[in-house]
Image (cartoon, rainbow, N blue to C red):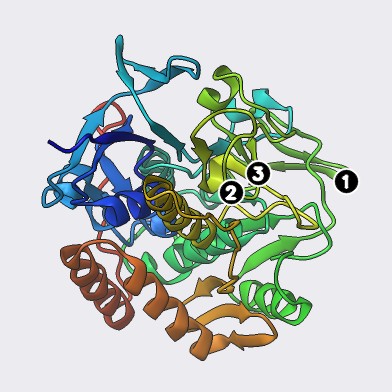
Amino acid sequence: MINKRRVVVVGAGFAGLQIIQKLANQDDLEVILIDKTNHHLFQPLLYQVASAVLSPADIAIPSRSLTSDYENVKVVMGEVTNVDYQKKIVYFQNKEIDYDYLILAMGARTSFFGNDEWKNYTLGLKSIKDALAIRRKLLLSFEEAELSGDIVTARRLLNYIIVGGGPTGVEMAGAIAELSYHTLRKDFRNIDPGLAKITLIEAGPRLLGGFDESLSKFTQRKLEQRGVIVLTNTPVKKIDQTGVHLEKGVIESKIIIWAAGVQGTTLAEKIGLPLDRSKRIIVNQECRVADVENVFVVGDAANFQEGLERALPGVSPVAMQQGRYVADWIQRDLKSKKKKPFQYHDKGSMATIGRNDAVAQVGNFKMKGLLGWFAWLFVHLFYQVGFKNKVSILITWVYSYIAFRAGARLIQDEISAEGK
């Protein structure tokens, strides 16, 4: 009889899924996946759900479907509340389970940089619940403007602010511009959706700070050509029911999308592991927590900086590579083989601005415009999980491109909406 070792994975994101796939059907391992949702989410396309291009089911797939062919994998829907590192026990939903190896891959949450009261007046974009809330508010704003039939009222209702000039903020601004100025243009009679005012605010000197400056300038120019007002070197001083307060005044808005920062989850704060200022768990060169036996942290939840000038960014390629590394580490440990430190291979960054325009960068190689857009389409389809989802997204994108239509424009009731 084989003496099985138990691996507990907390989180069904990019890192967690890579670990499970690599350890699947391994006779000497029992793998337990614990997640508070029942699905794996393709987060890079959340903004397309928020802007009514895709439906939630296009970018999410049930975890049980993904693991149904893996005989040694068990899925548990539950929220982890604590961990006993001495006894090697994970606590969740008034239950407990012991482990031999524990991997924390629970992602991150929205950060307001110490101004937590701002979350009462803004909308984040980290989950399907967030995306549906944004979609609902966006579509309702057009309906309310149409009902008013008044230009002044319409301008007030169709005033959107996005805070944060990283990829999420850029993509969200471009998507709302396309929705307002093109997709909905023929659908209303009393008002013109083109009355919408879209403002993208960035505290730093330029958009997409992690990209080459030429791509940042290209991105800003293309957004401005689409009607987006871009404000750089503009830190937010305050957000309240009126709108966003800046040094030079207030921009009034009832729809403020926050895309400016992330921090560790509430679980990371509870379980007594060393944290950085962003409440991410600090790990060593093996993605392990120092002085804690067989506990790993990967993806957005981890601060991996050993031997580097700055911590690795919270992006999906990092999470996926760390997931595969930890799975390999466990396999080597079972065979008493030597382990190597984790090394990240940067495969580049990309962001879409809108139809026919995107930017991409791999080292010194840069793409922009239509070529960048096709590269963005290919990469996001390639990494999407599940054949059905790939086909569904491709069909939706082709339809949207040809017809200039958004196919997921249902306004769901706030109580009954999925995840709400």
Label 2 residue SS: loop
Q: Is residue 349 above or below residue 57?
A: below
Q: Residues within 10 Å of mark 3 (few under 14, many from 20)?
A: some
Label 1 residue SS: loop
Q: How crowded is mark 1: few (under 14 residues within 10 Å), some or many (20 or more)?
A: few
Give the residue type that dot 3 points to.
Asn
Q: Residue under circle 2? A: 286
Residue 284 disc label: 3
Q: In which quarter of the image is residue 54?
A: bottom left
Q: Quadrant of the C terminus?
A: top left
Q: Residues within 10 Å of mark 2 (few under 14, many from 20)?
A: many
Farthest residue to the top: give it.
94
- Kindly identify the residue that appears in the image at 62 percent across and 72 percent down: 223
Q: Quadrant of the N terminus?
A: top left
Q: State which mark lies toward you, 3 or 1.
A: 3
Q: Do the residues labelled 3 and 2 touch (CB within 8 Å)?
A: yes
Q: Nearer the viewer, residue 315 or 179?
A: 315
Residue 248 disc label: 1
On screen, residue 37 versus residue 254, left or right, reads left
Specify which label sits upstream in the sequence, 2 or 1.
1
Give the residue type that dot 2 points to.
Glu
Specify which label sits upstream in the sequence, 3 or 1.
1
Farthest residue to the bottom: give it.
371
Rendering coords of residue 72 (x, y %): 17, 42
On screen, residue 2 versus residue 193, left or right, reads left
Visible residue check, residue 142:
no
Instruction: Measure the C-alpha gap from mark 3 to mark 1.
Output: 44 Å
On screen, residue 71 versus residue 142, left or right, reads left
Q: Which of 113 and 148 is in front in this view?
A: 113
- Kindly identify the residue that appears in the image at 66 percent across and 75 percent down: 219
Residue 194 disc label: none
